[in-house]
Amino acid sequence: MHFTRITMNPAQMGGVPCLRGLRIPVATVVGMIADGMSADEVMVELPDLDADDIREALRFAAEAVRERQLPLIIPA
């Protein structure tokens, strides 16, 4: 999968994946969506972003966890 809006620069934000060279980590955007914000609400909070940025952040996050085993804790 090819990501045109995701950048990683060791000299910026410790090299974490960000959107379009901005100091907006993908994890921040994904977290906002996970907390129940709509894409429109995220764009109000982070006006440098557009809908395509948010979609690509979500696709990047999905790809990052695809086909990896995640530890699940099953309550006793």
Image (cartoon, grey):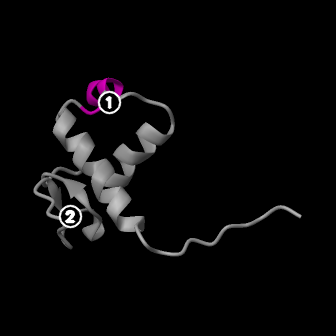
At x 63%, y 72%, the residue is 71
Q: Which mark is residue 12?
A: 2
Name the residue carrying label 1.
Answer: 39
**Label 1 CA crowd tier, 10 Å (few <14, some 14–19, many 20+):** some
Q: How many marks?
A: 2
**Which amino acid type is marked by label 2?**
Gln
Q: Position of residue 47 (x, y in %)?
A: 21, 29
Q: Quadrant of the N terminus?
A: bottom left
Q: Which mark is residue 15?
A: none
Q: Position of residue 13 (x, y in %)?
A: 27, 62
Judged left or right of residue 10, residue 35 is right
* Among the two numbered marks 2 and 1 on one chain, the one whose residue lies closer to the N terminus: 2
Q: Position of residue 68 (x, y in %)?
A: 46, 74
Magenta stretch secondary structure, dominant: helix
Magenta residue span: 40-46
Judged left or right of residue 53, residue 67 is right
Q: Nearer the viewer, residue 64 or 26?
A: 64
Tell whether position 10 is magenta. no
At x 32%, y 30%, the residue is 39
At x 29%, y 65%, the residue is 16
> Visible in this render: residue 49?
no
Mark 2 touches mark 1? (CB < 8 Å): no
Secondary structure beneath dot 2 equals loop
Image quarter of residue 50: top left
Q: Nearer the viewer, residue 17 or 13?
A: 17
Image quarter of residue 8: bottom left
> Visible in this render: residue 39?
yes
